[in-house]
Image (tube, coloured by chain):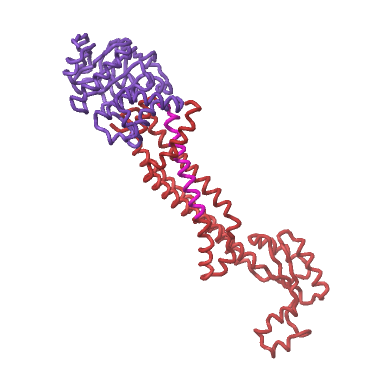
Amino acid sequence: MIHFKNVSKVYPTGTKALEDINLDINKGEFVFIVGPSGAGKSTFLKLIMREEAATEGEISVNGYNLIKIKKRKIPYLRRTMGIVFQDFRLIEKISVFDNVAFAMRVIGVSEKSVRKRVEYILGLVGLSEKADRKPSELSGGEQQRVSLARALVNNPELIIADEPTGNIDPELSYEIMELLVEINKRGTTVLIVTHEHNLVNEFGGRIIKINGGKIVGDYIREVEQ
Amino acid sequence: MKFRSSGYLIKEGIKSIWTNRMMSLASIGVLISCLLITGAAVVTSMNASSLISSIGDTNMITVYLDPQISDVDALKLGAKFDLIDNVKSSEFYSKSKAIEDYQEMLGDDIYANMKGENNPLPHAYKVSLEDFSKYEETVKEIKKIDGVYQIGNRSDIARKLTKLNTLVTYIGIAAVIILGLVTLFIISNTVKMTMYSRRFEISIMKSVGATNSFVRIPFLVEGMVIGLISGVISSIVMIALYNPILESVRGIASVVYKASIPISDIWIYIILAFLGSAVLIGALGSFISVSKYLKKEGGEILGW
């Protein structure tokens, strides 16, 4: 579902962010992309979302060829994935419910279906009680779960979590990881981008290590659950 | 974008006027000020023009007839004046009426000596012209008629009025253009500020897969509604203040008041012009600034 072949990315400033990346991520996998800051993780994410275009190589994501993709098709590519951003990216002025519903309204789902589905998803992440609150009234962990709910609401085949433990305290990060594992068990591909090795050691799965814009390790770590 | 979305998008646009009420209020305030200042410039220039033409109207020319002409022949001449192209109307002004009009100036003694056969004045016609700027040509035509002796020379005034009218029109157009540009500048900056504060929202919309039109429509609706509100308020203020301002001018110069354009003649144009331009400016302002952000991606939108 994600295919990179000889992919390089050089920014206009001359910064070489990624160099000759080759990888395939298949449906149903639970994958960590690990590396220190500045290793190229963010660029990797931007390429998948097609916020940036590769300088060289071939990329396809969820059936879209990202080298040939037309600009107007990019929104449709993004609808095939759910992204939990490190800074959550919630709209402050609207309620938790509307933040989650937003992702469904974008694709033109009827209000009736939106209501049903959002209520279900908020229940799944344990936020039914706070549907009417504004994001700013929630704790960091709760905001992250809203972000996760929004990523899940359209039932995407691929969930990407960018530094899911970066902005919240360790206990809560455990919670969000459990949720991601649960989602993966239902068949959704989960891609976690992180610089924390602890997380990887604890949960295991496929680990892709990036450093200096190159893949320096790609292996599976089994963990006794 | 699916059709189902359009109701939602329009609702979102209207809702966000309230959600971003401080920014909306600022935009409405700026738009109203600009509309009123530009509108006032247009209306003032129109009234100045009207005043000048009205002066032209009251200044008809006096055509003096040959002193030897008989009363009957003098009366017949009126029809000949009326045939000339630029002549609106002509009115016979007999020498006996003329001397009566001078009565007060002359004093009763002299007046008594000048009545009847002793009247030294010639018969005359008061001829009013359609277009005062064609004074010279018309006078030439009148002079060709037999029995015309002399024409009261107004060419100087005619030239000056025509010049003044042109000047006022140019000043009016220049004022409107300059104010229009200032308006566009202020409004584009207001919209830019609004958009800057909402660029985060735009980046979120894009990251969850919103198409460009989905992002754009609520902003467009918002801009148009803000334009509509500003247009309505400006129209009300302009129409409500028009007569009181004219009344206050009346105290200073009644000529100006008399020559002014009545509000009943122009209120509909004020409303149409204000609503039309305000809605257009609102829509265009939003459209252009959103498009600027839509071209960018992710962190670029936020300037990261």
Indicate the position of residue B251 as horizontal and vertical percent values. Answer: 52, 71
Q: Is residue B99 left or right of residue B217?
A: right
Q: Give the number of marks.
A: 0
Residue A16 showing in the rendered view: no
What chain is the red one? B
Q: Residue at (18%, 20%) from the top-left corner?
A: A196
Is B215 within the magenta?
A: yes
Indicate the position of residue B181 as horizontal and vertical percent values. Answer: 44, 47
Residue A59: quarter of image: top left
- Specify the segment rendered in magenta: B210-236
Q: Main secondary structure of the magenta part?
A: helix
Q: Residue at (36%, 18%) from the top-left corner?
A: A156
Position of the C terminus of chain A by quadrant = top left
Indicate the position of residue B129 as horizontal and vertical percent values. Answer: 68, 63
User: Chain A's colour?
Assistant: purple
Position of the N terminus of chain A by quadrant = top left
Residue A13 showing in the rendered view: yes
Residue A109: quarter of image: top left
Indicate the position of residue A145 as horizontal and vertical percent values. Answer: 28, 26
Q: Is residue B38 left or right of residue A62?
A: right
Of all residues, the one furthest to the bottom in this rendering is B109
Residues B182 and A129: in front is: A129
Is B23 within the magenta?
A: no
Of all residues, the one furthest to the front in this rendering is A129
In the rendered view, tell whether residue B170 sits above or below residue B287.
below
